[in-house]
Amino acid sequence: MSDHEYTPKSKFGKWFNDRLPLLSLASHLTDYPTPKNLNYWWTFGGILTFCLITQIVTGLTLAMHYIAHADMAFESVEHIMRDVNYGWLIRYIHANGASMFFLAVYIHIFRSLFYGSYKSPREIIWIIGIIIYLLMMAAAFMGYVLPWGQMSFWGATVITNLFSAIPLVGEGIVTWLWGGYSVDNPTLTRFFTLHYLIPFLILGLVVLHIWALHVPGNNNPVGIDIEKPSKDTVPFHPYIVIKDGFALLMFMIVFAFFVFYAPNILGHADNYIEADPLVTPAHIVPEWYLLPFYAILRSVPDKLLGVVAMLSAILILAALPWLDTSKIRSAVFRPLYKQFYWILVADVLILGYVGAMPAEGLYLLIARVATAYYFLHFLVILPVLGFKEKTLPVPLSITEPVLGGSPNLATARNRESLNN
Amino acid sequence: MKNFFKIFFSIILVFGYSQNSYSAEKVEYLKTDWSFKGLFGKFDRGALQRGYQVYTEVCSSCHSMKYVSYRNLAEKGGPEFTEAQVKAIAASFEVKDGPNADGEMFTRPGKLSDKFVMPYENVKAAQAANGGAYPPDMSVLVKARGGGVDYIYSLLQGYESPPAGFILDDGVYYNKYMYGNKIKMSNQLSDGLVEYADGTNATVEQMSKDVTTFLMWTAEPHLEARHQMGFKAIVYLIILTILVYFSMKRIWSRIETEV
């Protein structure tokens, strides 16, 4: 893991470090050689760490005042909003923080897709990331249930009911999940327990995610392996720290705007109505970040197959390092993949849009086409593209002008050779 | 870097747009100037006090407000009645308390710490008295409706005679802005229904605006504090971002790479 030997200067430091090499770890983290050409899309890793810590700190504070009981949860949230000192601030940071967390994670995932960061030797980093993403979705879903509003209750009912699609044991599993014969107090208390647990699991996985990253080092926009340390790298501190800090501040401005001036715009009005098992809301919609998968679920007429499609849509990502057969990582040198990449981005946005609409008529048709295309991209286009695509020449290093020295020059040279 | 921000902000815009399109039914709500909107939005103290009057004299006979306490009426950022006024308001309500030392329940005049007294004992009693419909609790009503304040403001003025052929059951009324146009609450407001202490002319429009402002406050009692803190926080963040930007430029100038 460490690239060079580190010896603490002080005697005590040396004594301590020989027994627990924390100082070596700190030295590794500050000196960690990072590609110098990382762009701003690479700052979202740091932003995500900030999001996780923010959610944990605000969440702990909320948990001190929240009451996980079907008869008192809604009231306790109002108590937080009204009577707890700055309770409104903490709750709005937590609620909007979930949205900001997902916004950042989607950018982080799509950055990976563009620059081929999931490819060898970074498959384990990628797969840990997918597990983190799955846990995030579970945590967010259960967190949304806790205020015990109408959307909480009915969202929980719809999602837990999905398990009833499992043949033979489905109904039994649903009853087991609920702790009764409908979503009720036992469901709320176990969701609260799990909602409290999952962020710490995520934290542990984030440590593994970063550890696994520090073995091969960062990918970079050119997508080539680089020597570390070399002219192509800069030490993590201060170069990357200050750049991540700058990006984080920009992100916090957007975050603050939502918290202070539009705290409820990303939520659903129905969740300010206390849960009522006898009244079903007109439209049951999940939070925006789950909408693409909700659209995939509803686009399949069969319940079981719908659930399978939804789960596969996420799990297929774990197989991505092997589905993408191209040897070239960065989309910069893959003219065809680049186009398909943007089509995929549009496809996912369209899925998100139709996920918010009623599943009927034209919306349903669009959802079906978009779902089919989503799987087509990963199962057909990506594997075939690796063999068929004529890629552009890749420079040998970030700084050395071996093949032009920069992606732009490399592209220009490639055009030249095509013209000749 | 330019490219990055272009993409980043268009993604945010797309999300913002898809959120707005949630509310499927598109009715143009009546518009009015809300003093509490915008970066520096504050409540109109007079409107809050008048709105409280409309709530007590009209709405509160059916609608509860169980999360609001009398003491809130004197708090900063609210209607800001004086403490003496609020004590008098609270004392004008009978609150059920107990059991006392003899195990008996008793009634006493309200105190600052009491929650607003509810018009009915429970939901069932409220339904029984209102033809089966439960008049919703008003504490967070504004946030619980897709159209927010504009919706409530419009609804209060949206009573019309139904179009020809529109069938209404007994105890159901036609409202232009209600979902499905059928509402179980009859038109409650009429010009001059309340007599405002400050001499404002109590038109239906005025009362609708006042009571909706009051409902916004009950739903978001810390709105003013939020706006004030938000402005400071964002200005602080922007200044810090600029400083960090120049530090970053300085640090990266040590190597010949553009940030």
Image (spheres, coloured by chain):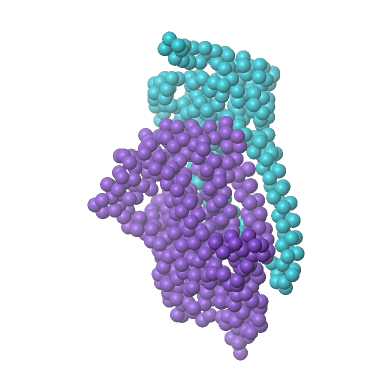
Chain colours: A purple, B cyan
Q: Is residue B208 above or below residue A188?
A: above
Total numbered labels placed on residues in the image: 0
Please indicate, yes or no, whether residue B22 appears anywhere in the rendered image.
yes
In the rendered view of the protein, which quadrant contains the N terminus of chain A? bottom right
- At horizontal 51% and vertical 26% (from top left) the residue drawn is B66
Residue B32 occupies quadrant: top right
Residue at 39% x, 23% y: name it. Answer: B124
Query: Furthest residue to the top?
Result: B102
Residue B40 in percent (x, y) is at: 70, 39
Whole-percent x, y for residue A398 in the image: 63, 77
**Residue A152 in the image, given as x and y percentages of width and height:** 44, 41
Q: Which residue is at a point 67% across and 24% down the rendered structure image?
A: B80
- A291 or A31, which lies in front? A31
Q: Is residue A270 left or right of residue A219?
A: left
Residue at image position (69%, 50%) is B237
Q: Position of residue B133 (x, y in %)?
A: 42, 26
- The answer to whether B206 appears left or right of A328 in the picture is right
